[in-house]
Image (tube, grey):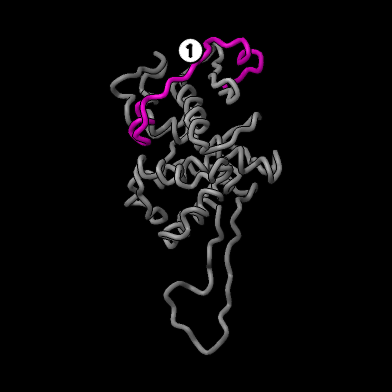
Amino acid sequence: MSQKIVAVQSDDDYFFVEAHYPSVTANTVDSCFYDFVSDVIHLTSDLGTSDYLWDTVLHEYGHYVADIYNITDFWAANHGPTQHQTDTFGKLVGPLLSWSEGWADYYSVVSQQMYAPYQLIDSASNPTNIADYKYKSRNIESDNTYLYGESNEWVIARVLYDMDDNGTSESWDNISYGGKGLFEKMQEAVPFLSILDTLSDFMDSLYDNESDDFGPLLSYYYIAENPTLPINNTTATYFAPRFEWDAGGGDPSVTTI
């Protein structure tokens, strides 16, 4: 299933990856993960009874796709969607980790939305937890908790999803590349013989076009600043204008907006 979305987005053939289930290594570290050195997905033995089986499997496959196309780098770490990853891992690793994990969260959701209704069933205890708008318990369209700017993987997932979808009812989202269009832009942004490390690196490749549309999107997720003065569309005067803005970058004291 996830191989098919690669084919649709990239026009390449399907990609198959080796997966170990149950994986002794995954059980030892008590975590599922993709090994970018050996190109192997490792899954814990308890995943088979998890309500989020396919969320997790397709998240790890998303890492494999990122590895093939150099869309993200990798950093082995305990992480989560409520984490301010720059606070936890520092400025060098935090945004890199958020970009990598946020991409995989996004990829898991869109993979299921495209193909899951026809091919997958989830565990018996939660059979409806596929092909919805959720990554595990979080709705990618509406869960506004822990918006820590570029240092949060959930923010990255939501930004990518907004760039993909047709958010006509969302005032901050005027971008709709579609899945294939977004994937192509990410591929175009990858530096020659290098890797796309962070959201900032990706955005730098986009600013030449449609830059006016990115401001509201990035401000909404606390990535960019939010101008407050002067008020938009007001008449200029002879007096020097006063400029004010709310800082972006996320705020650990803010858990909801």
Quadrant where the N terminus lies? Answer: top left
- What residue is shown with label 1? 49
Residue 114 in view in this figure = yes
Indicate whether residue 233 is drawn in magenta. Answer: no
Query: What residue occupies the far left of the structure in this picture?
Result: 118
Residue 131 in view in this figure = no
Q: Residue at x 51, y 44 (%)?
A: 190
Which residue type carries mark 1?
A: Thr
Q: Residue at x 63, y 17 (%)?
A: 30
Q: Residue at x 52, y 31 (%)?
A: 67
State whether residue 237 is above or below residue 130.
below
State whether residue 188 is above or below residue 116.
below
Q: Quadrant of residue 54?
A: top left
State whether residue 242 is above or below residue 108.
below
Report whether 42 appears left or right of 132: right
Report whether 228 appears left or right of 6: right
Find the magenta span and give its range. Answer: 4-33
Q: In front: 21, or 131?
A: 21
Q: Percent position (x, y) of residue 255?
A: 58, 45
Q: Percent position (x, y) of residue 40?
A: 54, 19
Query: What residue occupies the far front of the structure in this picture?
Result: 193
Q: In front: 50, or 22?
A: 22
Query: What residue occupies the far bottom of the structure in this picture?
Result: 238
